Amino acid sequence: MKLIQDMKIALKIRLLAYCLFAFLLIIGVVGLREISNVNDKLEELNNERLVPIVKLEELKSSMIAASTSANSYMNASDDEERFAEGGNHRNLNEDRGKLVRI
């Protein structure tokens, strides 16, 4: 304690400034490391969670298209009407193939 009391005020202020700078440096390094960890977890979240959600949405769209094609095919009164709209039967089979491949 006598050592601190015998120091000049300028030296005390300089030591205090050095300690403050060291603590700020430590806080900055820890903060950068934590930001890096958050970035890694965000990339993991995007790759493992968001991409499958997009694929599920594509699957849902394919199922709706297949259902629509099947309904229009079943609602047609005769074969000419069923195939007159550009081959709904062919599109239905293609949609089924997509569903199986996914």
Image: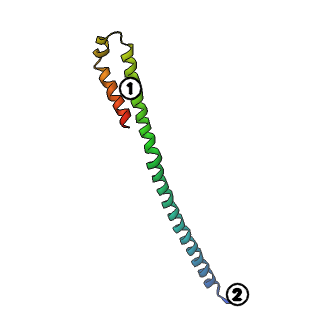
Q: Amino acid at mark 1?
A: Ala
Total marks placed:
2
Looking at the image, tell me whether mark 2 or mark 1 is earlier in sequence order: 2
Residue 42: percent from the left, percent from the top? 48, 53
Viewed as shown, does residue 82 lie left or right of 53? Answer: left
From this viewpoint, which residue is outermost toward the front?
Answer: 100
Residue 30: percent from the left, percent from the top? 54, 67
Instruction: Report the residue at 37% width, 22% height from top.
Output: 69
Viewed as shown, does residue 46 lie left or right of 85? Answer: right
Residue 41 against residue 102 in the figure, above or below: below
Residue 4 against residue 36 in the figure, above or below: below
Q: Residues within 10 Å of mark 1 (few under 14, many from 20)?
A: many
Residue 71: percent from the left, percent from the top? 40, 18
Q: Which mark is residue 66?
A: 1
Residue pointed to by mark 2: 5
- Which sits in the foreground, 25 or 72? 72
- Which sits in the foreground, 24 or 66? 66
What colour scheme was applied to this rendering of the protein?
rainbow
- Which sits in the foreground, 16 or 36? 36
Instruction: Report the residue at 60% width, 81% height from top.
Output: 15
